[in-house]
Amino acid sequence: MNTDIFLDPIFIAVAAVLLIVLTWFLVYYFRSRNRVNKLTEEFDHEKQTLIEDYEATQEEDRLSHKKEVSGLNEKYNKDTEQLNKRLRSVSQFTSDKGEYLTDLALKDLKNQLVKEDKIRDLDMHILSNIYLPSRNYTNTRKVDHLVLTRTGIYLMESRFWKGHIIHGVSEQNFEQLPYVENFFELLGLNKKQEQTFIFEKKDDLNVTVSHFNHMIEEAKLTAEKLKNVLKLQFDVVPVVFFNPEDNGNYSIANYSNDPSVKVLIGNEELDEYFKKYVFHGRFQYTVKDLTDIVDQLKALNP
């Protein structure tokens, strides 16, 4: 083999150049690979950082949204409960408006009498919404108002109404009020028993008729029960009070022959009735008697 070729300067120069190029290539390759690896690591790290930041942001947004939704639900429930309370209050006031206004009228009457030195504060007690429980609690009775005075105890059933009342009619009045007989027949009422009707204008063409005799009978029964529960010596006087809604646009025709229940219309009749009987009636109770009765009623209504 000819070894002179390896000693040729040109060959040596070419080999040296190739060696330098190879060395440079290897250096460049490894540097590039390291750079690529470093860039890949940096990219992966940045990618992972972005993913973690995104997930953290999403979780923060989710928690913030959840908290916001929870807050909105809480506010909704709170607002709804407040609205329901208002609606219940309005509904309760609407259904009990007559009782509320009657209670105010009675208290105003008492305050006036006390202020004028016609009675002392303990000479008259006004109680509202009193319940009389039965032994088996199936026949509990509610009393709208009780007026306790030294001349007697008055049990009042009140209704807020508008229209015209025909009270205490029976077959004895059919000749005078022939149209009333039709209502007895339509409702299947006992023609010999006194009945009470309220006629109310619904619109320009219609009139509604309400039958209120049950309220009269309930007042009698409740007054009797109150006397028995409290073991009173004297009868409790039942009073049915119609508190007019339309400021005087009302009327009553009283045909009743039953003196056991007093029917009153409007605050003027209410004032006149109590002023008359408070001042001119015979004393039945002492101040202590009235206080004891109030205590008994409060014990029944804890």
Image (tube, rainbow, N blue to C red):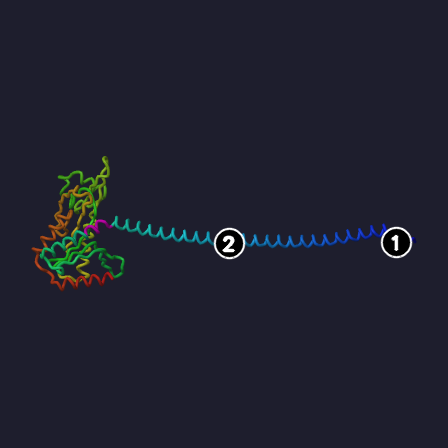
Q: Is residue 131 above or below residue 91?
A: below
Magenta-drawn segment: 96-102
Mark 2 vs mark 1: give the one in front: 1
Q: Please check the rendered image and state whether residue 219 is part of the magenta-colored stretch, yes or no.
A: no
Helix, strand or loop at label 2? It is helix
Q: Residue at 71% across / 54% down in the picture?
A: 30
- On-image quarter of the C terminus: bottom left
Say what amino acid the circle numbered 2 marks.
Glu
Q: Earlier in the sequence, mark 2 or mark 1?
A: 1
Residue 59 is labelled as 2
Q: Is residue 235 in sight in this rendering?
A: no
How far across and down, in percent of the image, does residue 194 sit?
16, 47
Q: Nearer the viewer, residue 164 or 113?
A: 113
Residue 7 is labelled as 1
How far across and down, in percent of the image, does residue 18 sit?
80, 51
**On the picture, is 101 further left or further right than 26?**
left
